[in-house]
């Protein structure tokens, strides 16, 4: 196992716009997270507001694909989200104090998990300056077959690309001019349970669907903003209101 120093982690992140930290959680910690996640899905998710949970098919609970704001709904995940273990990495990479924005759970169920369109998280965040990180903690073994994350190295230095509405629930905006050169530049990232992927809010990434016959692709997503970054709350609220209305009219909530 390769053990990266803080300097190596920072250098890789600054150069590529992402970094992979192997075995960030040990197997016992991963098992604890997964056990609590299973309890959360069973005991809490049925009572969550519709806007905090998304399904591939909302009439089939087993197709749950995304959960929002876990830290607001469960003390276990709240402690995890604000722990020095995760916050310290965010502060190292952004070079500043940070504020926790969102803790999410992602899944691509076997056979039916839909692709994630190419996008930049910063397009959704609406920050000035756009300085934030997303951490992606693998809870399953991940490769091309079940939809690994694909990054374009260095894309965080080139600004926000043009985005347009997609039909993917949970990822409503995707890069509108994604072309052959973009696909050719992608780096697929394999991960094992406990590995941590961290990317800048401007780093372009996407993922294929889950074509495997019996493997899920579960992960936790930690979003931290630089403390000095400011959200455009009015613009964000208007966007969320419009999106919620459209999803409701389409019968997806």
Image (tube, rainbow, N blue to C red):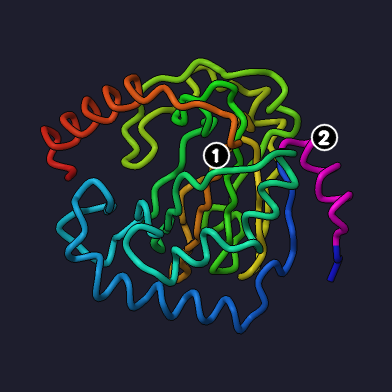
Residue depicted at 63% across the width and 23% down the height: 180
Q: Earlier in the sequence, mark 1 or mark 2?
A: 2
Q: Any magenta on residue 37?
A: no
Categorize mark 2 by other alpha carbons within 10 Å: few (<14), some (14-19), many (20+): some
Percent across and percent down for residue 142 are: 59, 62
Determine whether 111 is above or below 25 in the image.
above
Position of 221 relative to 13 (above/below): below
Q: Is residue 7 magenta?
A: yes
Q: Which residue is at the far bottom? A: 28
Residue located at (50% from left, 23% from top): 175
Q: Which mark is residue 206?
A: 1
In the rendered image, residue 7, in percent from the top left (x then y), is placed at 88, 49
Closer to the camera in the image, 126 or 248: 126
Percent across and percent down for residue 186 are 68, 36
Residue 2 is left or right of residue 136, and the answer is right
Residue nearest the observer in this picture, 217 or 145: 217
Label 2 residue SS? helix
**What span is colored magenta in the figure?**
4-17
In depth, the one of 230 and 178 nearer the eye is 230
Residue 4 relative to residue 185: left or right: right
Secondary structure beneath dot 1 equals strand
Residue at 54% across, 30% down: 120
Q: Which residue is mark 2?
A: 15
Q: Marks 1 and 2: which is nearer the front?
A: 2
């Amino acid at each position: 196992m390769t053990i990266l120093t803080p300097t190596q982690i920072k250098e890789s992140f600054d150069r590529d716009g992402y970094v992979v930290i192997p075995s960030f959680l040990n197997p016992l910690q991963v098992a604890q997270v997964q056990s609590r996640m299973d309890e959360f899905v069973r005991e809490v998710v049925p009572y969550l507001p519709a806007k905090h949970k998304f399904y591939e098919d909302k009439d089939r609970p087993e197709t749950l694909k995304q959960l929002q704001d876990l830290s607001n709904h469960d003390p276990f995940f709240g402690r995890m989200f604000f722990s020095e273990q995760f916050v310290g990495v965010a502060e190292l990479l952004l070079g500043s104090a940070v504020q926790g924005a969102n803790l999410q759970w992602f899944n691509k169920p076997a056979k039916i998990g839909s692709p994630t369109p190419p996008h930049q998280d910063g397009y959704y965040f609406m920050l000035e300056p756009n300085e934030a990180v997303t951490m992606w903690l693998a809870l399953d073994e991940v490769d091309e077959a079940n939809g690994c994350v694909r990054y374009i190295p260095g894309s965080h230095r080139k600004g926000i690309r043009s985005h347009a509405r997609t039909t993917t629930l949970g990822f409503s905006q995707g890069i509108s001019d994604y072309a052959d050169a973009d696909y050719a530049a992608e780096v697929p990232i394999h991960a094992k349970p406990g590995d941590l992927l961290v990317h800048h809010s401007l780093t372009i990434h996407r993922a294929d669907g889950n074509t495997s016959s019996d493997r899920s692709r579960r992960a936790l997503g930690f979003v931290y903003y630089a403390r000095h970054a400011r959200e455009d709350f009015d613009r964000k609220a208007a966007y969320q209101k419009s999106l919620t209305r459209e999803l409701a009219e389409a019968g997806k909530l």
